[in-house]
């Protein structure tokens, strides 16, 4: 298990179980990746702000072996593109 860091844009979030999510990210070094974020929908989650849609964030993750999802362990938001999210036409184009 290798710990990696990268800068990424959040493209998609899919709820999984009660408190987990599968997040699709566009990373600068690794390209498009899906990652598993445990407990992110819980009330005291530290990752919640870092994986909002259309946010540029600094991520830390543990790469997994043989095709399973990587585990997201940290997400620090850098830029949140709020103007795109407010307008549904822009949101659909994004």
Image (cartoon, rainbow, N blue to C red):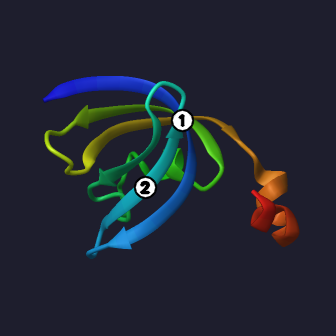
**Residue 62 x/y as whole percent:** 23, 34
Number of numbered tags placed on the structure image: 2
Which residue is rendered at x = 39% and y = 46% of the image?
A: 46
**Residue 13 x/y as whole percent:** 48, 63
Of mark 2 and mark 1, the one earlier in the sequence is 1
**Residue 63 x/y as whole percent:** 23, 34
The foreground one among 42 and 88 is 88
Q: Is residue 75 left or right of residue 35?
A: right
Q: What number is the disc on residue 87?
A: none
The foreground one among 2 and 21 is 2
The foreground one among 69 and 5 is 69
Which residue is rendered at x = 63% and y = 45% of the image?
A: 55
Count residues near mark 2 (Cα–Cα under 10 Å), then give few for <14, some for 14-19, many for 20+.
Answer: many
**Residue 38 x/y as whole percent:** 26, 56
Residue 93, quarter of picture: bottom right
Q: What number is the disc on residue 23?
A: 2
Count residues near mark 1 (Cα–Cα under 10 Å), then give few for <14, some for 14-19, many for 20+.
Answer: many
Question: What residue would you read off at disc 1?
Answer: 8
Q: Quadrant of the image for the C terminus? A: bottom right
Which residue is rendered at x = 30% and y = 68% of the image?
A: 19
């Amino acid at each position: 298990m290798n710990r990696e860091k990268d800068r990424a844009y959040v493209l998609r979030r899919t709820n999984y179980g009660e408190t987990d999510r599968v997040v699709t990210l566009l990373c600068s070094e690794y390209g498009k990746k899906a990652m598993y974020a445990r407990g992110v929908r819980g009330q005291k989650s530290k990752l919640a702000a870092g994986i909002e849609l259309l946010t540029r964030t600094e991520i830390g993750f543990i790469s997994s072996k043989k095709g399973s999802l990587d585990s997201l362990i940290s997400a620090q938001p850098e830029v949140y593109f709020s103007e795109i999210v407010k307008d549904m036409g822009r949101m659909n184009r994004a």
